[in-house]
Amino acid sequence: MTTNQDVLIKVEGLQKSFGDLHVLKGIDAEIKKGDVMVVVGASGSGKSTFLRCLNRLEEPTGGRITFEGVDITDRSVDINKHRQKMGMVFQQFNLFPHKTVLQNMTLAPIKLLKKKRKEAEQTAMELLERVGLADKANAYPGQLSGGQKQRVAIVRALAMNPDVMLFDEPTSALDPEMVGEVLEVMKKLAKEGMTMVVVTHEMGFAREVGTSVVFVDEGVIVEQSAPEEFFGNPKSPRLKDFLSKVL
Amino acid sequence: MQLFHSIALSAEVNGFQKFFSELTDSFDKTFIYQDRWQFFLDGLLATLRIAFFAALLGILLGFLIAAVRSTHDMRVAGRKSRGFGDVLLKILNALCNIYITVIRGTPAVIQLMIMYFIIFANSRNKELAAVLSFGINSGAYVAEIVRSGIMSIDKGQFEASRSLGFNYSSTMFHIILPQAFKNILPALGNEFIVLIKETSVAAYVGISELTYVGNLIRSRTYEAFFPLIAVALIYLAIVMILTFLLKKLERRLRNSDH
């Protein structure tokens, strides 16, 4: 039995519709500190929408999300404050092309956390060092490869010192030879104890790094279990069918 | 035979000399006599003043309106309005739409005449009327240029900034507008070139800017060539200088492109 304090994100009855399209039909989930929750499912299943609801990039149309004890679906909550604690990495990297790598990483810490420029730059350089990109600090995103861009995007989010990292198909837009370097960074991050929610098609990563794997289909969580169980002994026919196609 | 030849030659020389003296005479009447060059200089300065302040006003109005319109499009459109803020935004957006429709749908010279003969009927500040009229006119075009720039930025940029914790306006200010500005610079430059030449319309209501001065001197001297060509060349020079400066700015902003 875990105490309430260990639960970082609690999702209850989460619903999301786009007009008449009902994408999420009541999702319940709990993410504890240090968890690496890997979300898999076919495209169009709602897994990305689920992730994007967690920091309200998509406004949920029903249900509740509690982050660090605060109901962030409440309209009176300042979501910007809570987003500072939830790093997000996108499929398309979304680095700011008019800013250098270092500026990409220091903008938010300086403007939002009111850090001194020197301090923010030092933190950024340490992070870049960790992902092997210190020499690219003054490059513009346009000069980087896809894998390098995604690594910068990860450390840009880390520069805010978040409590959880959300990954939205971080390797799906990469050339195959660059997938490894990004997954390596994510593995390291998981090992250091970062709480992560990862939407991905990388089943190897799910098996190796995930503490729990979630299968989303048609807007609901069909199955959730530890990786060995998830891949070794899938229960529902839909998951069996899905796994037979992707493995 | 020789005599005939020399007469013809002298006639030719005479003709050339006559043409040349007429030309200097005309030049003299247009620019030198009674220090008329001073008129051109004053006219030029008036044109630059009107164009400069109208451009400032146009930028200010244009960015404000573009901000309202894009905020409206991103936030309110496509969902039910919630609360006072959304209603206000809807009203503002409707006002902006009316403004753009009216300003783009009527000739600038009519707008100027309305400003000058109706709104400024009791004021002597002719130039202010021109600045307001051209500024308001330009704002409608700048607004649509800026809005197109904002729309041209990938939605992912917006999301990345929001996911870091920036609010809507900081996202606009730090992330969206700098990139949009770079994309719309050529179109904005075009708008300002049009604006500078458009100020010549002010001559129509008797504001003594460059075009008015050129025409005035033409009517005083009965010489059309020099006053009009001079005015044309001065406009050309202003536009060329502006184009040069814009190109320089564009090159500087391209630094991050690789």
Image (cartoon, coloured by chain):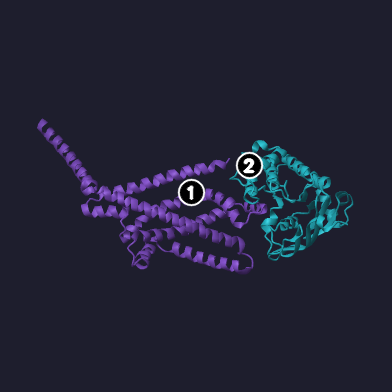
Q: Residues within 10 Å of mark 1 (few under 14, many from 20)?
A: some
Q: Which numbered disc, 2 or 1, marks the residue closer to the eye?
A: 2
Q: Nearer the viewer, residue B177 or B145?
A: B177
Mark 2 residue element: helix
Residue B9 to residue B134: above or below: above
User: Residue drawn at (66%, 54%), measured in percent from left and top?
Assistant: B165
- Give the chain ID for the cyan colour: A
Q: Is residue B1 visible?
A: no
Q: Are marks 2 and 1 in contact (CB under 8 Å)?
A: no
Picture quarter with the N terminus of chain A: bottom right
> What is the spatial separation of the Cα atoms under label 2 and label 1, in whole angstroms?
36 Å
Q: Position of residue B148 (x, y in %)?
A: 54, 55
Task: Name the kind of residue labelled 2 in the image.
Answer: Lys
Task: Name the kind of residue labelled 1 in the image.
Answer: Pro
Task: Determine the residue located farthest toward the right in the rendered image.
Answer: A233
Give the colour of chain B. purple
Q: Position of residue A165 (x, y in %)?
A: 74, 50
What is the count of numbered marks? 2
Task: Identify the image quadrant of residue B119.
Answer: bottom left
In the figure, is residue B17 to the left or right of B69?
A: left
Q: Is residue A140 visible?
A: yes
Task: Identify the image quadrant of residue A134.
Answer: top right
Q: Residues within 10 Å of mark 2 (few under 14, many from 20)?
A: few
**Residue under label 1:** B186
Output the chain of dot 1: B
Q: Position of residue B16 (x, y in %)?
A: 19, 39
Mark 1 residue element: helix
**Residue under label 2:** A118
Tell me, yes or no, whether dots 2 and 1 are on the same chain. Answer: no
